[in-house]
Amino acid sequence: MGSKQKILTGLVLLTLTLTIVACSSNSTNISAPIRATWIEPQVAVDIVSIPLSEVENRMMTHFKLATTDGDIAYMAYVVDGEIFVRANVCPPCRSIGFSLNDQTLICDTCRTTFKAKTGGGIVGACVDFPKAAVPYEISAGQLLMEGTDLLSAYQNTLNPGLP
């Protein structure tokens, strides 16, 4: 190996070493996405409930609601101390799985990203299908949602844009 090649190789190794050191010293600023945990909702007449503690402790949860047309999925998660409940479907790629990375929802199938606070698309193939919110109330340690609100949010997510 000539002297120019040795110098070039040394510079490449030095650059790699400095990059690794810089990345490891900033590792506290890099967060890994939180994969959702499936939980079981309780259904009583037209009210669906999930434990508040499950959402707060896990930070990202999914749950399914049985309908006559089959199960439909939702997500409940925490961002900046606030809980959000949204339809959990990415229609173009047919995913029902999302992860949470700081303030971003990430489709587990196509990797399209959405703003966790608004459900609006950021970038990716399915960006035109924002995740519709589900209104809820908190009572006795439970998030309470009306079945009609859940179905409406799901239907709104199946169409491009939000109503």
Image (spheres, grey):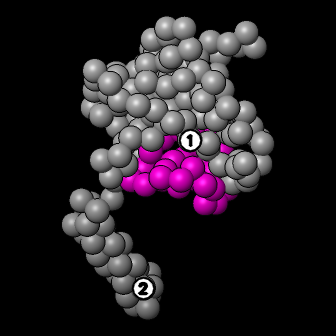
Question: At label 2, which amino acid type do we have?
Answer: Leu
Residue 54: % across, % down: 32, 25
Whether residue 6 appears in magenta in the rendering, the answer is no
Numbered range of the magenta stretch: 96-124
Residue 108: % across, % down: 57, 39
Question: At label 1, which amino acid type do we have?
Answer: Ala
Q: Nearer the viewer, residue 42 or 61?
A: 42
Q: How busy is the neighbourhood of tag 2: few (under 14 within 10 Å), some, or many (20 plus)?
A: few
Residue at horizontal 53 percent and vertical 53 percent from the top = 118
Using the rendered view, name the quadrant where residue 26 is placed.
bottom left
Q: Is residue 156 left or right of residue 38?
A: right
Q: Is residue 64 left or right of residue 91?
A: left
Residue 41: % across, % down: 46, 15
> On the rendered image, what quadrant is the N terminus found in?
bottom left
Q: Which mark is residue 8?
A: 2
Q: Which mark is residue 133?
A: 1
Q: Nearer the viewer, residue 88 or 12?
A: 88
**Callout 2: SS:** helix
Residue at horizontal 61 percent and vertical 44 percent from the top = 131
